Every structure is written in structure tokens, then in C-alpha cells.
Image: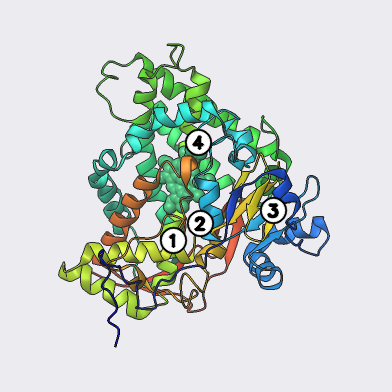
């Protein structure tokens, strides 16, 4: 009889609860041109380019799931001109792109629809050394500890907003979430807390931002956005709305420059007013405006819609909602339950469903290779719905995350690597505080139990009816 030797280092059992699994390994990363020549290119979605662009923009979910079903986990799309990206959803491929050197796989956000609005030089749109400089400059106020200071302010904004909601009358949650996240972003970015007094530049700015965001949902504005793709300067309706906003942003910058005590203030505008470029120069008003607007646009609707989606899921999953309510109201394991619900909400409905890099040399993606210059997109949506990673991927199961941290390359609603979302800690703090307050104070129901479909706006995926709810009772 042979006795198996005990391993010296205790081996961690893979989680055996069937809630989170592992993907089989798949080699990926930069390769030599000769090696690339020996591998096939990914299969191409067989539809005319123009049709693919329309389908992808209007029904991305159906498009990517169908392509994965018919072609496998790596496929190439066609665009109009130039060709569309290769799309992958394997964690090893994603790891190779997130950990690549910046020059090997620069971000595609330089080509983002926000570029005509925030210019080519903001932290979102710049690439290379300039991007790294901007990021370093902006990181401190977005750091986890710095963000904790905002918890009280977020709670205040949430409580005030909840007080205003009707009982027993259906309403859309997404705009209400936006009201909260706008307050938070105005405070964090501009140092403007609450509702500023009438007639002040701060009040005028807040109104202009709300106006720009409201206008951006009009069909005419969507057309205007299409016209703006690929430009450095905006045209059409976007230009008109922006010129008002710009004037007001510059007025707030000017006022703040002239105020005493900027050194003590901790909002991002004041911090940037003190910041110097590598050459020792202060940032220009234009540079300030580009960064500030980037933060407002990147941080406000994303967080609001992420919360709206989580609620859209939660009120259709009674057992999960019940567990959260019990935990929050009894105070037992509340933090764990809140974290699990947010993590699962962002897994099942990632507000930004796809992100991309452009590989500058030949790149291996499993059994395929793509040539230098190929845009490679990572479908967050497909990754988050892999059966091998997340058994029953379409079920909303926050319990997947109890006692378990999400994997760096398996759960990526904030992207990753050197382009990982700058506002992730702030967005998580906002979601925790708002989810807690709503769970504690309200009993919510879905207006209609059919799940809400997704609408794609710019780079985001939002609930089509705005996550409609009914407040059944209040506490
Ligand atoms: C739930 C809310 C949010 C989601 C889902 C989200 C998601 C993302 C994603 C997917 C990216 C691209 C990452 C990549 O390509 O690897 C990104 C970038 C970025 N986000 Fe967020 N975001 C959220 C909230 C925020 C907030 C609150 C702010 C700031 C106030 C913010 C600021 C930014 C900036 C500046 C970038 C560009 C970073 C860079 O390129 O270096 N985001 N975000």
C-alpha cells in the first residue's frame, strides 16, 4: 500500500461552492513576427461592415453573444473604414493587454466619443508619457483614503434626494441617481457643495452641466455625436451646449484663482490650480477645463447608471433583496452584503461593456495571432458572463462574492492596468453609501417584473426605462 506524501505547503482548495470558477489557460501576449505568421487570424463576423457598426451600436449584447456562440471567444468585426476591432473575453488575453508596456498596447480612448468634448490631451484621451503625467497628478485625490472623506457628503446628498421621492407612484431611478452623483462630483471636483446661491458662477456652472447632460439624451444630440466622431473640436449641438458650459467653467476657474485659501482647499480644481507641469509652469485654463470636464463626464452618469442597474437586478431577485435588507437593517454583516450586491451588479450589468487597446506589434490571443496595429477590444460583458468563471452567469447571485474578492482579470468593470478607472474608489464609495441608505429607508418594487433592456449611449450601457421603481413603503 502506498501512502501519498503530504504537500509541504498547504494547497488552497479551489472554491468548491460552484459560484465562481476558472477559465482554462490560453497563451497571450506579444510575439515575434515569424511566430505570428504560423498562427491563423481570428475568424471574422460575416456581415457587411456598415450593418455590423449599426448592430453593434444598437444591440451590442445580441451582437457579441451571437458572435461568440458562432465563432468562439476571439473574433474580428468589420467596420466601415478602418476595420473594426478584434474582440476577446478570455482572462489571460485581458491580462496580457493590462500588463503590457504602455507603448505596446496604448488605450483606444484616444479615439473615444468624448474626445471632441474634452480634447486630445486630458487624462482620458492622452496616451504615452503625457497620460502618465496627468494620471500621477490626479491620483492623490482619488486614492481610497482621500475618498473616505467624502462618505459624509455622499450620505447627505443621498438622504436629501431620498426625502423627495414619491410613495406608491412609479418613477425612473436613473435620473434620481444622477442627481446624487452630480452633487458628489461637483463637490469633489469643483469644491461646490450643495446648491450654490443664485447668481453665483458656481450655480451657473451646475445648471450648465445639468443642461449638457440632459440635452445629450435628445435624438438630435445623438446625431450630433455621430458628426463629432474622430474630431478634435466639436460641431453642431455639442458645440453650442459646450460653449455655454465653457464660459461658466472658466468663470469658476477665474474666481477660484483670485480667492484666498486655495492652498487649504482639497477639491480637485484647487489641487490642479497649485499643480505644476514638468517645466514648472502652472496649468493653463484650457488644460484645467479639459481635466475637470473629463472627470465630470467620466464619473457622473457611469456611477448613477451602475446604481440604477444594481437596483434593476435586485428588485427582480427577491431572495437577494431580502438578504440585503435583513443585513442592513439588523447591522449584521451589512458591509459584506452591500459589497457583494454591488460587485454582482457590476458583473451582470457593466455600465461600460467594452474597452480597447491597440497592439503595436503582433499579438497572440490563444490559437490566433493578430498583426501590429490591430485594435483589440475586451468585451467586459462577455467576460462577466463566462460559464466557466461564473456558473449560471445570467442569474443575479451576490452570494458569489461573500468571502471572496473579484479576480483582477475576471471582474473588470473599471478596466485595468495603467488605464484603470481613476474614479473607481470614489464610484465604489458612492455606490456603497447610496445602496445602504436606500435599503435602510425604503421598500422598493419593480413597476414591471420584465427585465429592462439595455440602451447603448456613447460608450455606456444603460437601462432603457431608467430602472423604474415604486416605493412601497418608507421607514
Ligand atoms: C461605476 C462607475 C464607473 C465605471 C463603471 C467606470 C468605468 C471606467 C472604465 C471601464 C474605464 C476605462 C478603463 C480601461 O480602459 O482600462 C474608466 C476610465 C476612467 N474613469 Fe471611470 N468609471 C466609473 C466612475 C468614474 C468616476 C466617479 C470618475 C471620476 C470622477 C471616473 C474617471 C475616469 C477617468 C479619468 C478614466 C480614464 C483613466 C485613464 O485613462 O487613465 N470614473 N472608467
Residue 252 at least partly seen: yes
Residue on which disc 1 sits: 346
Give percent across and percent down for residue 169: 40, 70
Residue lying at 81% horizontally and 63% vertically, measured from the top left = 47
Image spot of residue 425 (x, y percent): 35, 46
**Disc 1, SS:** helix
Write down the quadrant of residue 251 in the picture. top left
Residue 150 in which image quadrant: top left
Point out the frontmost of discs 3 and 2: 3
Q: Is mark 2 within 8 Å of ligand 1?
A: yes
Disc 4 + disc 1, Cβ < 8 Å: no
Q: Which mark is residue 242?
A: none
Disc 4 CB within 8 Å of nearest ligand 1 atom: yes
Pointer 4 and pointer 2: residues touching (CB < 8 Å)? no
Regarding residue 371, the answer to whether it shows in the image is no
Tell me if residue 131 comes above or below residue 169 in the rendering: above
Decide: marks 4, 3 in contact (CB < 8 A)? no
Query: Gap between marks 1 and 3, in whole Å?
Result: 31 Å
- Location of the C terminus by quadrant is bottom left
Discs 4/1, front: 1
Q: Which residue is mark 2?
A: 351
Seen from the viewer's position, the closer of residues 375 and 268 is: 375
Amino acid at each position: 500500500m502506498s501512502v501519498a506524501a503530504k504537500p509541504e505547503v498547504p494547497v488552497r482548495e479551489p472554491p468548491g461552492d460552484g459560484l465562481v470558477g476558472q477559465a482554462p489557460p490560453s497563451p497571450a501576449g506579444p510575439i515575434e513576427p515569424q511566430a505570428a505568421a504560423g498562427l491563423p487570424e481570428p475568424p471574422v463576423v460575416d456581415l457587411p461592415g456598415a450593418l455590423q457598426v449599426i448592430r453593434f451600436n444598437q444591440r451590442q449584447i445580441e451582437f457579441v453573444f451571437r458572435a461568440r456562440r458562432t465563432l468562439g471567444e476571439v473574433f474580428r468585426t468589420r467596420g466601415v473604414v478602418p476595420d473594426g476591432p478584434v474582440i476577446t473575453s478570455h482572462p489571460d488575453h485581458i491580462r496580457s493587454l493590462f500588463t503590457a508596456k504602455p507603448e505596446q498596447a496604448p488605450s483606444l480612448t484616444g479615439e473615444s466619443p468624448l474626445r471632441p468634448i474634452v480634447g486630445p490631451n486630458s487624462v482620458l484621451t492622452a496616451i504615452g508619457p503625457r497620460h502618465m503625467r496627468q494620471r500621477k497628478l490626479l491620483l492623490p485625490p482619488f486614492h481610497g483614503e482621500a475618498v473616505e472623506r467624502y462618505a459624509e457628503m455622499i450620505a447627505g446628498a443621498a438622504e436629501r434626494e431620498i426625502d423627495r421621492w414619491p410613495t406608491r407612484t412609479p418613477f425612473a431611478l436613473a435620473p434620481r441617481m444622477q442627481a446624487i452623483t452630480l452633487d458628489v462630483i461637483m463637490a469633489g471636483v469643483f469644491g461646490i457643495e450643495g446648491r450654490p446661491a443664485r447668481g453665483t458662477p458656481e450655480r451657473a456652472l451646475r445648471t450648465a452641466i445639468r443642461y449638457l447632460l440632459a440635452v445629450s439624451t435628445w435624438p438630435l444630440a445623438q446625431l450630433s455625436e455621430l458628426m463629432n466622431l474622430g474630431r478634435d473640436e466639436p460641431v453642431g449641438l455639442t458645440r453650442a451646449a459646450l460653449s455655454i458650459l465653457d464660459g461658466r467653467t472658466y468663470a469658476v476657474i477665474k474666481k477660484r484663482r483670485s480667492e484666498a485659501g486655495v492652498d487649504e482647499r482639497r477639491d480637485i480644481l484647487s489641487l490642479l490650480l497649485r499643480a505644476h507641469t514638468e517645466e514648472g509652469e502652472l496649468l493653463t485654463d484650457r488644460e484645467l477645463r479639459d481635466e475637470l470636464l473629463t472627470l465630470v463626464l467620466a464619473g457622473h452618469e457611469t456611477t448613477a447608471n451602475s446604481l440604477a442597474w444594481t437596483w434593476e437586478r435586485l428588485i427582480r431577485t427577491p431572495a437577494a433583496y431580502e438578504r440585503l435588507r435583513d443585513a442592513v437593517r439588523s447591522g449584521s454583516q451589512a458591509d459584506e452584503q452591500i459589497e457583494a450586491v454591488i460587485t454582482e451588479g457590476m458583473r451582470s450589468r457593466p455600465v461600460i461593456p467594452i474597452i480597447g487597446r491597440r497592439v503595436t506589434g503582433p499579438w497572440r490571443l490563444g490559437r490566433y495571432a493578430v498583426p501590429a496595429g490591430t485594435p483589440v477590444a475586451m468585451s467586459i460583458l462577455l467576460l462577466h458572463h463566462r460559464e466557466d468563471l461564473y456558473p449560471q452567469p445570467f442569474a443575479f447571485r451576490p452570494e458569489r462574492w461573500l468571502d471572496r474578492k473579484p479576480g483582477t482579470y475576471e471582474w473588470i468593470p473599471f478596466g485595468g492596468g495603467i488605464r484603470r478607472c481613476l474614479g473607481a474608489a470614489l464610484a465604489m464609495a458612492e455606490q456603497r453609501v447610496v445602496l445602504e441608505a436606500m435599503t435602510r429607508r425604503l421598500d422598493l418594487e419593480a413597476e414591471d417584473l420584465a427585465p429592462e433592456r439595455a440602451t447603448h449611449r456613447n460608450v455606456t450601457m444603460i437601462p432603457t426605462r431608467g430602472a423604474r421603481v415604486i416605493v412601497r413603503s418608507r421607514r
